[in-house]
Amino acid sequence: MKKIAFILASILLAGACNLEKYPSDALSAESMKSPENSGTVTDGTYAMFKSILMFHDQDYSANSYVRHFFQMAEFRGDNIVLCAKTTDPLNKAINYNDESGDGNTSYYWWISYKIIFSANAMIEAIPEDSTDPVLRHILGENYFLRAVSHLNLLQIYAFPYTHGTENPGIVLRTSTDCSVTEREKVGKCYEQVENDLMKAAELMEGGTRRGNNGYANYEAAMGMLSRVQLYMGKWKECITTVNTVLGSADPATKLDPNYENLFQNSKTSPEVLWCVAMVPSDWTSQKGSLGSMYYSYDTKTGKTGSPGGGGWGEIYYSQPLMDLFGRYPQDIRYKTMAEACDEDATKMMVCWPQKGEGVYRTMWSDDNPTLNTDGEPVSCKGPDNKTYTIEKKIVNTYPEYHVTYGGEDIRVGVMHKCALNDKITLYPVVYMKKFANMDGTPNVLNSPIMIRWAEVILNRAEAYAHKGDVTNTLKDIKVIRDRAGLTGEAEMKEDNYVERGYADLVDLVLDERRMELCFEGFRPTDLVRNKKDIDRRYGGFHPYELVKYNDKRLPYMIPFDEISVTHIPQNRQ
């Protein structure tokens, strides 16, 4: 069946825009009246999210939709740090210097429109007036896949809806007719995505998911609709959508009680609404997988720390993200997903950024600071080998550690001793495991989650926050924090969240989204659509800067392949 799906998907690919003429006799409404036929072709469309297809006469092992999307969506933000320069185009994504000929942006644009074309072919072929529930569900899946593909393109190549609906968006494809080659306005693009998801939900409501979480269903469409409405600033509609899909269910029952299981077994986790379902054979090289840059392990010993085995392990938690998690050491989201290479729990280390060459900041680390009887550092050696006093400060009820170095007050990171990557920046090696250990095995493979219930609940929380509804905002936040183990004194309440530094209720939700959804492709978009700057003033191989929310570098460059054929306007003009 998998082979048949691939062959049929290839027929669709051969007819995609800018390639060969679409073979009009390959699909017909008559043949698509069979749920088996329409289901098999749709399976081929799903496969394009993970398959490594021939592009520019190469089948490069790192070219996949999911790898490029998750990296490009996350790397503009402040959750990650790259420890050293790499030849992979992800280096440009992190440093805001991508170009129109880069392989990641070019492949991602290309494969996205292949998926959209395939979905359009099915939408045109399946009779919309069919009374067959399976056929109607499959038609809904194709509306869903078209909507998601357009939405993700908008996230990568355009400014958010909240920056203005007249801004240039993407090329909007709602049929297999490829004669339209203009960038539609952002507003119209988002409206089309919203309408497609409403249609998808209507068609799939009451139906049955055709397999594991790798298939879309009614709940997935409604969850994605809540995301779109949040991004459009439709607070009331977002709340209504979430209320509708939840019904009378307690939101807490929608979360996987085992946070680690959520990611290791995303194909079956009850929290996952839709993921890109993987099996090990889907990757020809683990080093080309999505998880390869975040994690590394030795294939012989099964232990972490050796890039000679599985994964490169060159992208880590940023210091600001670790500091945020550090407010509550019991937070299982960090305890289960972060892994320090060669961590020594009996020793502590302190580190802080210092000026390096050009625009970058190296990291100074002392892995043998002087500790007090409570195990807290009180002094350490600096880069000049002098001893510096570490001052503990309470900021917004949370402890912070500072040194005065070079006449400047610097916040230092305090953590258990771990290995340092000394290629460029001496950055502490703290791996992220959300995209690793699929099915509980030591690897860098995963079935990446595209949408899950925790996000949907946080979508509603943010919508409530924008409306100034403190009670309901904190109620949704409590659901998320309870699962993370943040109960009792750690709970956010109406009488304590302001003293904890959140005069703006939206900032509270954004921090919770940051911790819950880190590395899943949300952080830059969450900041920019709320017109908040991206603070990247921490050590790592990236410019040490505060990036304004309207910085023209934020949307990626439209690929040269597209520009050279259709002459659509480029970003950053």
Image (cartoon, helix red, strand yellow):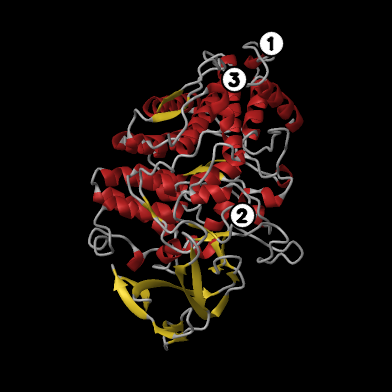
Outermost front residue: 358
Percent of width and height locating residue 263: 57, 52
Percent of width and height locating residue 357: 50, 64
| C-alpha span from label 3 to label 2 | 40 Å
Query: Which residue lies under the disc numbered 1?
Result: 25
Q: Is 308 displayed left or right of 81 in the figure?
A: right
**Residue 307 vertical position relative to residue 272 in the rendered view, above or below:** below
Percent of width and height locating residue 184: 43, 24
Numbered mark located on residue 86 in the image: 2
Image quadrant where one finds the C terminus: top left
Callout 1, which amino acid? Asp
Query: Which residue lies under the disc numbered 3?
Result: 122
Residue depicted at x 73% and y 60% = 309
| C-alpha span from label 1 to label 2 | 46 Å
Residue 240 visible in this rendered orientation of the protein: no
Quarter-of-image position of residue 222: top left
Residue depicted at x 43% and y 35% = 158
Residue depicted at x 45% and y 49% = 253
Percent of width and height locating residue 54: 71, 33
Q: Secondary structure at mark 2?
A: loop
Q: Secondary structure at mark 3?
A: helix
